[in-house]
Amino acid sequence: MGIPFDPEKFAQSVSRRAFLQQSAYGLGGLALGMLLDSAAQAAPPKGGSPGAIRPLHIPPRAKRIIHLC
């Protein structure tokens, strides 16, 4: 049997700034891992050059778009 978890004591021992900093490091590490994993699995298509754009399955129907930044 371990030490019981006390949420009030934990909240007093960890500041908001430290919590957000540690969370940001964790999320950044996950994002980097996902980027590196997808780059390692990427392979050129079988039928053409690596930079070729394949034709769309459905032709585009949009006549006008509004781009907001």
Image (cartoon, rainbow, N blue to C red):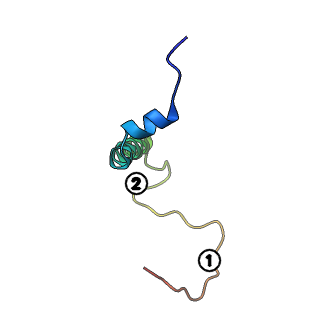
**Drawn side of residue 33 relative to residue 61, left or right:** left
| Residue at x-position 66% and y-position 70% | 58
SS category of the residue bearing label 1: loop
Residue 1 shows in this picture: yes
Mark 1 → mark 2, Cα distance in angstroms? 24 Å
Which mark is on residue 12?
none
Foreground mark, 1 or 2, reads: 1
- Number of numbered discs visible in the structure rendering: 2
Q: Residue furthest bottom?
A: 64
Closest to the observer, 47 or 27: 27
Quarter of the picture holding the N terminus: top right
The residue pinned by badge 2 equals: 50
| Residue at x-position 38% and y-position 48% | 16
Looking at the picture, which amino acid does disc 2 mark? Pro
| Residue at x-position 38% and y-position 44% | 19
Residue 69, position as x, y percentages in the image? 42, 79
